[in-house]
Image (spheres, rainbow, N blue to C red):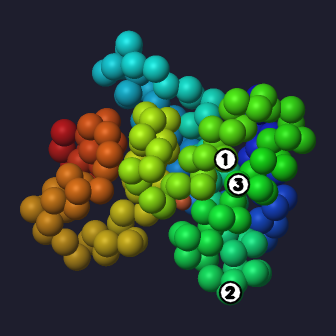
Amino acid sequence: MLKNKLIKELEQYFADDQKRIQHALKVTDYAEKLIKAFKEKYPDKNINEQVIIYTAVLHDIGIKNSEVKYGSSSGHYQEIEGPPVARKIMKSHNIDFETMDEVAEIIAHHHTPGKVSSNNFKLLYDADWLVNLPEVYNLNKKNTTEKENLIEKIFLTSTGKKIARKEFLNNY
Ligand SMILES: [Fe+2]
């Protein structure tokens, strides 16, 4: 399966940087959960599972070059540095151009919602936030209302909000 091959590439690329590898794997797990829930809720809406999964595995691949070139892992640099690395990896596995272009485009905007409005983008964005929310917003120091407000504000899909409530508020 191509997903597993891309995970192997990710592990090789980040070598001993377990933090990055684990992050991408967690985002990929959430992406799979989101895809399943989204398809159940919206069977008629078109999403491309491969695009979402490949993007989940490769979305932060630009971090390494951002740190080397600019000494920064900020989202802006990652968005610039990620697509060429991701394309090179995808090309070596003969992933078709259309898929490759869409994955690269999502990576190029994954910290900047609004520019790409596809459901593929939104689900990837929500998967990333399901992993990042507790740390970025110190969730264990927030009360229920604050958590609810954050979830409302941050997640782009109702599927993402629902899973976030389940994970962080223990309810539906
Ligand atoms: Fe991420």
Q: Amino acid at mark 2?
A: Gly
Measuring 62% from the left and 82% from the top, which residue is drawn there?
Answer: 72
Tell me if I can see residue 112 in this picture. yes
Quadrant of res 117: top left
Q: How many marks?
A: 3
Q: Tag 1, which secondary structure?
A: helix
Q: Position of residue 112 (x, y in %)?
A: 45, 59
Residue at 66% over, 47% down: 104
Residue nearest the observer in this picture, 42 or 88: 88
Please report contact status of discs 3 and 1: CB closer than 8 Å, yes or no.
yes
Q: Is residue 41 above or below residue 157?
A: above
Pick whichever of labels 2 and 1 is earlier in the sequence.
2
Residue, disc 3: 83
Front-lying residue, 46 or 37: 46
Q: Provide the residue designation for mark 1.
A: 104
Cα gap from disc 3 to disc 1, whole angstroms:
5 Å
- Label 3 residue SS: helix
Which residue sits furthest top? 44
Q: Residue at x 57, y 37 (%)?
A: 52
- Near mark 3 (Cα within 10 A), the count class, few <14, some 14-19 or many ≥20, is many
Q: Quadrant of the N terminus?
A: top right
**Quarter, ligand 1:** bottom right
For label 2, the SS is loop
Foreground pick, 59 / 7: 59
The answer to whether residue 20 is visible is: no
Residue most extreme to the bottom: 71
Tell me if residue 13 comes above or below residue 118 in the rendering. Answer: below
How crowded pointer 1 is (Cα within 10 Å; few <14, some 14-19, many 20+) is rated as many
Determine the image quadrant of residue 13: bottom right
Tell me the residue that label 2 is attached to: 71
Q: Residues within 10 Å of mark 2 (few under 14, many from 20)?
A: few
